[in-house]
Amino acid sequence: MYTRAQVLKRLRAQVGAGHPLVGAGAGSGISAKYAERGGADLILVYNSGKFRMAGHGSNAGLLAIGDANAIVLEMGERDVLPVVRETPVIAGVNGTDPTRVMPIFLARVADTGFSGVINFPSHGLLDGRWRQSLEATGFGYDREVEMIRTAHRRDLFTLSYSFTPDEARAMADAGADVVVAHMGLTTGGEIGAQGSWAKSLDQCAVLINEIAEAARAVNPEVMVVCHGGPLETPADVRAVLAETDVQGFIGASTMERLPVETAIEGAVRGFKDLALR
């Protein structure tokens, strides 16, 4: 486990050397192990990773099919933390969970060995009347902001998924060290977002810049990275980095689902294409 100051020092050293920050979601120990070998600056454990690596879409992490916070604790303690050697590991915390006393739960997250937190699952992924209903009945994005504020006061390293400039301002005010401009469900592969659910790279660049500007208006020192949507490949991220003033990228499906889909299918097909004597 790293302190907040130690994580910030590591990340700022990378940016200062001209390298983008790269965070990798890990839904299994093998994903975490090889993300670290690939040079990930952060490894993130989300409840969606459990479902993603079981062959389901990341949206499963938003459904009532498990205790998101308990899943992340178990994944971290038994799957990811035992195999990661030097990389800070971040817990995806469901800040809207009404069954947790959040200061006590965050202490447990730190005691487990996580070096920081990010707000996931996030109600920022929801919209329409269901989102309005959640906001009106005490289950809004503001609880995620308060979770980040509480973690910051405990001197935990914090990242925040923000989907709009207003959310970015709120998270920067709460003390988020890194604002993650979220572009929606990742496209590509067997179960990625398609059609009207997906933004273009140009649309992403505009929104990312708006989110970054809003966050830095509150805290000029906040780091901003991007995530999701059509950012499937290094080439996609390179194109967006060229049009924005952000410092890196966090991937989950891009780091494990998309590579696994093609690698396993290709490997098995290679054996199947062999001929018998």
Image: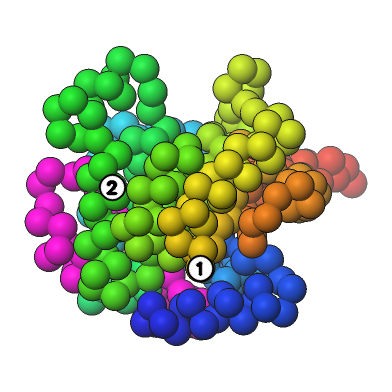
Q: Which residue is mark 1?
A: 221
49 displayed left or right of 17 = left
In which quadrant of the rendered view does residue 203 lie? top right
- Start and end of the magenta stretch? 79-108
Render colour scheme: rainbow
The residue type indicated by label 1 comes to Glu
Is residue 90 highlighted in magenta? Answer: yes
Identify the residue shown where x is 48% and y is 77%.
8
Q: Which residue is mark 2?
A: 144
Compared to residue 221, the image places residue 131 above or below, namely above
Q: Where is the N terminus found, in terms of image quarters?
A: bottom left
Compared to residue 106, the image places residue 167 above or below, namely above
| Residue 52: x %, y % from top left | 48, 43
- Does the CB distance between marks 1 and 2 fall below 8 Å? no
Q: Secondary structure at mark 2?
A: helix
Residue 271 appears in view: no
Q: Nearer the viewer, residue 218 or 18?
A: 218
